[in-house]
Image (cartoon, coloured by chain):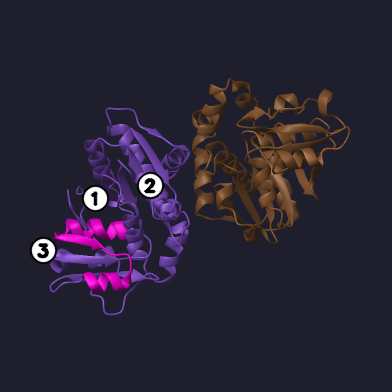
Chain colours: A brown, B purple
Amino acid sequence: MQVQVISSVNEASSARFHHKTAIIIDVLRATSTIITAISAGALCVVPAETVMEARAMHRPGDLLGGERFCRKIAGFDLGNSPEEYTEQVVAGKRIVLTTTNGTRAIHKSMRADYVLTASLLNAEACARAAIDLRRDVIILCAGSHDEFAIEDGLCAGLVLDKLQSLSQVAIETDDFGTAMLALYRNRSNRIKETVLSGISGRRLLKLGMKRDIETCTAIDIYHDVPRLNGDQLTRI
Amino acid sequence: MQVQVISSVNEASSARFHHKTAIIIDVLRATSTIITAISAGALCVVPAETVMEARAMHRPGDLLGGERFCRKIAGFDLGNSPEEYTEQVVAGKRIVLTTTNGTRAIHKSMRADYVLTASLLNAEACARAAIDLRRDVIILCAGSHDEFAIEDGLCAGLVLDKLQSLSQVAIETDDFGTAMLALYRNRSNRIKETVLSGISGRRLLKLGMKRDIETCTAIDIYHDVPRLNGDQLTRI
């Protein structure tokens, strides 16, 4: 199984996703929020690229969620903190979500045969699902402001580490994947510190959102995998 | 001191180099060849972007060196293997060199206050020189075919490691720099194996150039630093 890793949305061209399983990673915070919502019983999460598109997709009974500049969007029900997406709030609900990088990354990968979303919270489950889908894999790190973000690289490394330990067939990766695996292995006992040292981590800290970093750096606490069906992410 | 790391030539915009010290890395093989030539007593190395430009710059008594598709260019005196650049061949000579990625990376960085070239062979010397120059640093990994190459990332990590241990002032780096430092630290006892596993390493192996990989993965055997003066790289 070939596993390519792309460093940021900016680097992703749609054509590369053909016939592959895409794994989208935006640890701070879109894919952490998506798995939290799905595991709390949300019916589905609909990723929207723009605020206008999110509003247009919203139907009575839905929740509107998302952020711009890390803040909740005016008039939306929810921001982009996983903690807001509790069972009480989201169970049985369709959630329309728009974020700066994560939902854009999901849209970028739509030509893939399968699209999964991974975070530190569900990396192993995602690796297992990718193995079951029997396609070559392309991991897209969403990044931040069109640049590589360390937390997404760590998560890509963790997914690769799990793919290597769980797959019956050999896992071959590209040079960037090798680097992300080494990054994860070098920092696996300092995940939170590493995320806090990165550009997104420092930004959230400055905005008083340290709890989000705590929430998003727990490893493999969820066993679900959000997968794109049409325009909706649902539990596999 | 701020240290930014750029993953491939493709990602580099000239404007980012302003007021900085640029460190250009192309381990396989341009910057390894350049330091080998300079340490063997070459007068200077003149990086040329194209074969035509190299021919036009050539003056009587000069040596023409370089590669396209990893092979020596027809009519040139030398290819891009460090081993060709012995004292006997290059001492006192001006060398005009053109390679696919390395010399392009050097040209990209020309707006920097200082341009140094680093390889595994002279990483520590390069870190010391950058500290002495008292500018923020931008490390440009040349990469291969416009993509990140693992050997350049390892070298960037080694330079960062040396900057951190040698600098009197704090070294701050970006997310990609943090990742490259972790990559180096995870693989520091398997440098050659890691380089051999990468896309450039495998390509050279296939072309029967394994000795070049051996030659280019020795650590800190040279203490010189090639620095750009006008259009020439000379010993600092």
Q: What residue type is labelled 1?
A: Ile
Q: In this view, does B64 lie above or below A152?
A: below
Q: How far apart are marks 2 and 1 (CA)?
A: 33 Å
Q: Which chain carries label 2?
A: B
Residue drawn where x is 54% and y is 47% of the image? A7
**Residue reaching furthest to the left:** B92
* Residue holding disc 2: B15
Q: Residue A178 carries which label?
A: none
Q: Label 3 crowding class (10 Å Cα cut-off): few <14, some 14-19, many 20+? A: some
Question: Where residue B82 sits: x, y (%)?
Answer: 27, 63
Question: Where residue A232 sits: x, y (%)?
Answer: 80, 45
Q: What residue type is labelled 2?
A: Ala
**Residue reaching furthest to the top:** A208
Residue drawn where x is 26% and y is 44% of the image? B113
Q: What stretch is highlighted in magenta?
A: B29-57
* Tags 2 and 1 both on a single chain: yes
Question: Where residue B86 sits: x, y (%)?
Answer: 18, 65
* Tags 3 and 2 both on a single chain: yes
Q: Marks 3 and 2: CB-CB under 8 Å?
A: no
* Residue holding disc 3: B92
Q: Quadrant of the N terminus of chain A?
A: bottom right
Q: Quadrant of the C terminus of chain A?
A: top right
Q: In this view, does A145 lie above or below B195?
A: above
Q: Mark 3 lies on which chain?
A: B
The answer to whether residue B41 is magenta is yes
The answer to whether residue A222 is magenta is no
Q: Marks 2 and 1: CB-CB under 8 Å?
A: no
Mark 1: secondary structure: loop
Viewer-proximal residue among A92 and A179: A92
Q: Mark 1 lies on which chain?
A: B
**Mark nearer the N terminus (2 vs 1):** 2
